[in-house]
Image: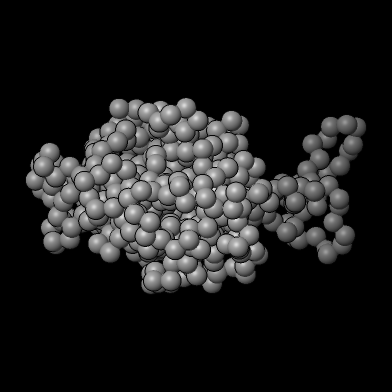
């Protein structure tokens, strides 16, 4: 007759039993399993039959646990589907399995007339991680402006079928049309060329992602975008006075006066200061030039075109090594030769724009006499010579400028275009140096971040300028 099963007394448990308990999947019985001697090995112990109760209890517990685990898994899946995804630092929400950018969602297809807003989700929709933008945290950097999603048909109607009469600009990346949205808002609608699909798609995603996160009155405002099937369009605030390039270089429009040029220089400096000093990590524009500076109805400047922008490194020097992109004549020497990119690369480009404001010349002009083809190399030795400085000023100004202000701006330009990056100033210092000169150019309203303490102000005493 089989012995009745009874729990062992609370005596010390064998080490083997403890090891089995630790390795066994939860739940496990707190009691050591009864040992059965099968008579092998020369022992003559008793055979004990396992109790039915001992067999039923673990099986029941295991079954209940399995049901609970399945229920928890179902709840987690349902909850996760209901929450919007956000892009983590190293994750791409839109990348396919082969590493290529996946097609954007078709929620703004041509038959879907419902408008939606993508403020918090835009980083996920357009794959921030795979584009090198993963350093941004959506929770910390996302601005509440929101970018509206348009259908292709809506933008087609806004531009009268992308009429040639509405073309206001074009370049290698696409054509810009003047348009009017359904609510009457004037807009500049940029239709991107996707001849080189991968690069065009990348630039589109970068621009949407960056401008949806950053809010500054010195950057062109992104009203929305369209990723309808194969169409890629960006919708910006309309700048009625076009680009700075169209006013500085051969143009039928009246020339910009001195005070307006100073105001534009200050607005651009504040834009780069925002990108470099008040964004974390810093944003490097990488293609800062006159053609990417737009003017509103009051000739206040806004920086545009962030398709090639790069997020700076978190290292002390903020340096990023990347392939060289940009426009000839604006590229910093160290970036053009080695691909090493920092915020000081933008500072160099800003110095070139200052020279354009001073002289009215383009950065590279092969039609000029030998020695004057490249603006920087021609202007640099003249910037600290008062007589030569006056001679190089844009003739369109007709001498209508203050010599003291001219010398100060020339000193700033000379610092910005230094060959060695470490000798160039921070944009914060440039802003502080320009504020006293551009007296009639107040700061535009913005929920601004306090300006960093001034390290040094660039200033050249007019009386110390070389008079030879």
Residue visible at 24% across and 53% down in the picture: 254
> Compared to 367, does 139 lie above or below?
below
Residue visible at 47% across and 27% down in the picture: 370
The image quarter containing residue 336 is top right
Examine the rendering and report whether any part of residue 399 can be seen: yes
Comparing 389 with 14, the one in front is: 389
x, y (%) of residue 87?
Answer: 47, 51
Instruction: Name the residue furthest front.
Output: 468
Comparing 310 with 265, the one in front is: 265
Comparing 260 with 307, the one in front is: 260
Comparing 394 with 197, the one in front is: 394
* Left or right of residue 8: residue 283: left
> Compared to 247, does 145 lie above or below?
below
* Left or right of residue 182: residue 452: right
- Count of residue discs: 0
Residue visible at 76% across and 47% down in the picture: 20
x, y (%) of residue 115?
Answer: 20, 56
x, y (%) of residue 458?
Answer: 60, 60
Residue visible at 60% across and 36% down in the picture: 334
> Compared to 367, does 181 lie above or below?
below
x, y (%) of residue 22?
Answer: 75, 51
């Amino acid at each position: 007759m089989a012995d009745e099963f009874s729990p062992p007394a609370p005596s010390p448990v064998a080490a083997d039993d403890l090891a089995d308990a630790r390795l066994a999947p939860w739940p496990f019985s707190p009691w050591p399993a009864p040992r059965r001697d099968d008579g092998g090995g020369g022992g003559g112990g008793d055979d004990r039959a396992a109790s039915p109760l001992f067999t039923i209890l673990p099986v029941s517990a295991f079954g209940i646990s399995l049901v609970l685990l399945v229920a928890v898994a179902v709840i987690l899946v349902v909850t996760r589907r209901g929450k919007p995804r956000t892009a983590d630092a190293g994750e791409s929400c839109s990348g396919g399995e082969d590493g290529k950018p996946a097609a954007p969602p078709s929620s703004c297809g041509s038959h879907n007339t419902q408008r939606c807003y993508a403020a918090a989700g835009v980083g996920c929709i357009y794959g921030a991680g795979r584009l090198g933008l993963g350093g941004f945290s959506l929770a910390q950097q996302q601005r509440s402006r929101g970018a509206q999603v348009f259908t292709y048909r809506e933008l087609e109607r806004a531009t009268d079928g992308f009429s040639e009469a509405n073309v206001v600009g074009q370049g290698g990346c696409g054509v810009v049309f003047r348009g009017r949205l359904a609510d009457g808002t004037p807009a500049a609608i940029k239709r991107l060329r996707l001849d080189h699909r991968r690069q065009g798609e990348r630039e589109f995603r970068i621009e949407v992602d960056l401008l949806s996160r950053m809010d500054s009155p010195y950057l062109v405002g992104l009203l929305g975008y369209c990723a309808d099937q194969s169409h890629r369009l960006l919708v910006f605030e309309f700048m009625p006075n076009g680009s700075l390039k169209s006013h500085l270089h051969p143009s039928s429009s009246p020339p910009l006066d001195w005070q307006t040029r100073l105001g534009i220089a200050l607005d651009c400096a504040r834009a780069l200061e925002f990108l470099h000093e008040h964004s974390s990590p810093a944003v490097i524009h990488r293609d800062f030039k006159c053609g990417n500076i737009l003017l509103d109805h009051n000739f206040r400047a806004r920086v545009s075109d962030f398709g090639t922008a790069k997020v700076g490194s978190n290292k002390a020097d903020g340096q990023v090594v990347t392939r060289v992109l940009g426009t000839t004549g604006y590229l910093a020497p160290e970036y053009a030769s080695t691909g090493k990119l920092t915020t000081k690369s933008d500072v160099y480009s800003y110095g070139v724009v200052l020279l354009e404001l001073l002289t009215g010349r383009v950065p590279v002009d092969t039609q000029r006499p030998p020695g004057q083809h490249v603006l920087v190399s021609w202007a640099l030795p003249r910037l600290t010579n008062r007589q030569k400085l006056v001679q190089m000023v844009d003739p369109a100004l007709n001498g209508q400028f203050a010599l003291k202000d001219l010398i100060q701006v020339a000193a700033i330009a000379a610092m910005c275009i230094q060959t060695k990056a470490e000798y160039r100033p921070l944009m914060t210092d440039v802003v502080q140096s320009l504020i006293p000169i551009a007296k009639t150019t107040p700061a535009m309203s913005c929920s601004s971040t306090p300006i960093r303490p001034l390290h040094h102000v660039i200033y050249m005493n007019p009386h110390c300028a070389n008079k030879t």
